[in-house]
Image (cartoon, rainbow, N blue to C red):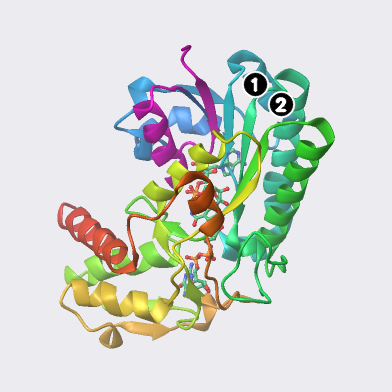
């Protein structure tokens, strides 16, 4: 069988790096879209890809530019396209909703249109999010749950999801959306709450910091491991027909519980260090997310292998070593 060619947008991010490794392990030829500046500063901006850089084909393009995306697609002509690039930080989307919409909505639209024009048989994955559920009318949330986004980020993902479905239905294209709940790892960005906590634990342990300022400690999230979730992205593009799937662990925990376990993992009591700082509250909060991934389990056998305590432990242990080495 001919080698399959995959193109990943957002390959430098947490998920992009795990997905690239997974696809390489399956024998794919892996291409990635990066911003031009990343190629100028590879040691910093491509650091998540450092172990596999020599096996990748990287192309510079911008989600803000249709011609640049069109150019890469006409050169690569992928069999599968994983569209992961996005302004993914919910807090920032309140500060600059306009650029979030431009990147997340127009960027998705440009890609879908370029695929339709150039490679309509290419299978397309859209990175949807549990933030689309927002103020959800039910717990747990499934593919049937109504969307009620509570941030510009959530709105941008609902629009990307609707665009993706509309291309599937209007042009008979293979477009699948994952509705992924929070997934974390030692490669998570430092501003997201899990990595903020685990990196602070490590720096407090070293005596570099004395406090961890956080916002809403009662928010509940369904946290899984990114390495498990990228496998589901790949499986979604291997089905006979394109469809949308929730990917989640089915458990929910508060930010406070995450703190409790993370500090305990380093032999500390979180109550001695965590302070509530109103600057980290959001104008509108999503209070409870918990996913029902039974459709994915039934259709392609996907299940999480890493649950909450193991995830916290993995991230804390990684950061204790990382900051020890600094
Ligand atoms: P991430 O670590 O923040 O990575 C985002 C990627 O998008 C980076 O490679 C970034 O490139 C790229 N990007 C951002 N703006 C861009 C632009 N204007 N042009 C080109 N590239 C741009 O995110 P992630 O956690 O891997 O998430 C991957 C996708 O899944 C995102 O679409 C996110 O919204 C979605 N998602 C994530 C989760 C989660 O819990 N992680 C859950 C549901 C959905 P630079 O390196 O150059 O900044
Ligand atoms: O916040 C609360 C905050 O920024 C989680 C993205 O990957 O997952 C992610 O979005 C919760 C929220 O992730 C702080 O209010 C408290 O309730 O880690 P987060 P997120 O907003 O859930 C979804 C599924 C995505 O799609 C997104 O791309 O933690 N929280 N105190 C805090 N959050 C942050 N960041 N910082 C705090 O100090």
Residue 17 seen anywhere in this rendered image of the structure:
yes
Task: Say what secondary structure mark 1 lies in.
Answer: helix
* Residue 150 within the segment the image draws in magenta: no
Task: Say what secondary structure mark 2 lies in.
Answer: helix
- Of residue 300 and residue 202, the one placed in the foreground of this image is 300
- At a point 76% along the width and 26% down the height, the residue shown is 116
Specify start and end residues of the magenta stretch as a single range. 1-29
Q: Residues within 10 Å of mark 1 (few under 14, many from 20)?
A: many
Question: Residue lying farthest right?
Answer: 170
- At a point 39% along the width and 66% down the height, the residue shown is 194
Disc nearest the viewer among 1 and 2: 2
To which quarter of the image does residue 107 belong? top right
Q: Give x and y (percent) for residue 26.
A: 38, 27
- Of residue 229 and residue 140, the one placed in the foreground of this image is 140
Question: Residue lying farthest bottom?
Answer: 271
The answer to whether marks 1 and 2 mark residues whose Cβ atoms lie closer than 8 Å is yes
Label drawn at residue 313: none
**Residue with the mark numbered 2:** 115
Mark 1 and mark 2: Cα distance apart in space? 7 Å
Q: Is residue 202 left or right of residue 223?
A: left
Q: Is residue 178 above or below residue 52?
A: below
Q: Give x and y (percent) for residue 173.
A: 73, 31
Question: Residue lying farthest top?
Answer: 2
Residue 34 seen anywhere in this rendered image of the structure:
no
Asked whether mark 1 and ligand 1 are closer than 8 Å, the reply comes as: no
Q: Is residue 287 left or right of residue 198?
A: right
- At a point 52% along the width and 83% down the height, the residue shown is 278
Q: Is residue 226 above or below residue 276?
A: above
**Residue with the mark numbered 1:** 73
* Residue 9 within the segment the image draws in magenta: yes
């Amino acid at each position: 069988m001919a080698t399959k060619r995959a193109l990943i947008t957002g390959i430098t991010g947490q998920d992009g790096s795990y997905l690239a490794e997974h696809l390489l392990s399956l024998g794919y030829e892996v291409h990635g879209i990066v911003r031009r500046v990343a190629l100028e500063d590879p040691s910093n901006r491509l650091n998540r890809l450092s172990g596999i850089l020599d096996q990748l084909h990287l192309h510079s393009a911008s989600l803000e530019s249709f011609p640049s995306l069109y150019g890469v697609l006409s050169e690569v002509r992928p069999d599968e396209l994983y569209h992961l690039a996005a302004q993914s930080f919910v807090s920032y989307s309140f500060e600059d909703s306009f650029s979030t919409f431009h990147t997340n909505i127009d960027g998705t639209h440009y890609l879908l249109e370029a695929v339709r024009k150039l490679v309509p048989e290419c299978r397309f994955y859209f990175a949807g999010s549990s933030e689309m559920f927002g103020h959800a009318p039910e717990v747990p949330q499934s593919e049937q749950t109504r969307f009620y986004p509570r941030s510009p980020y959530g709105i941008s993902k609902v629009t990307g999801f609707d665009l993706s479905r509309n291309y599937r239905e209007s042009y008979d294209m293979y477009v699948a959306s994952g509705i992924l709940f929070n997934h974390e790892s030692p490669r998570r960005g430092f501003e997201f709450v899990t990595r903020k906590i685990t990196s602070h634990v490590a720096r407090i342990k070293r005596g570099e910091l004395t406090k961890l300022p956080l916002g809403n400690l009662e928010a509940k999230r369904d946290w899984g491991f990114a390495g498990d979730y990228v496998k589901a992205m790949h499986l979604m593009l291997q089905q006979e027909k394109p469809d949308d799937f929730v990917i989640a662990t089915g458990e929910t925990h508060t930010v406070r519980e995450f703190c409790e376990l993370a500090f305990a993992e380093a032999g500390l009591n979180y109550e001695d260090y965590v302070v509530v700082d109103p600057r980290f509250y959001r104008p509108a909060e999503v209070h409870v997310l918990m996913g029902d991934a039974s459709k994915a389990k039934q259709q392609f056998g996907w299940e999480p292998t890493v649950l909450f305590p193991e995830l916290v432990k993995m991230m804390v242990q990684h950061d204790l070593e990382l900051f020890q080495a600094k």
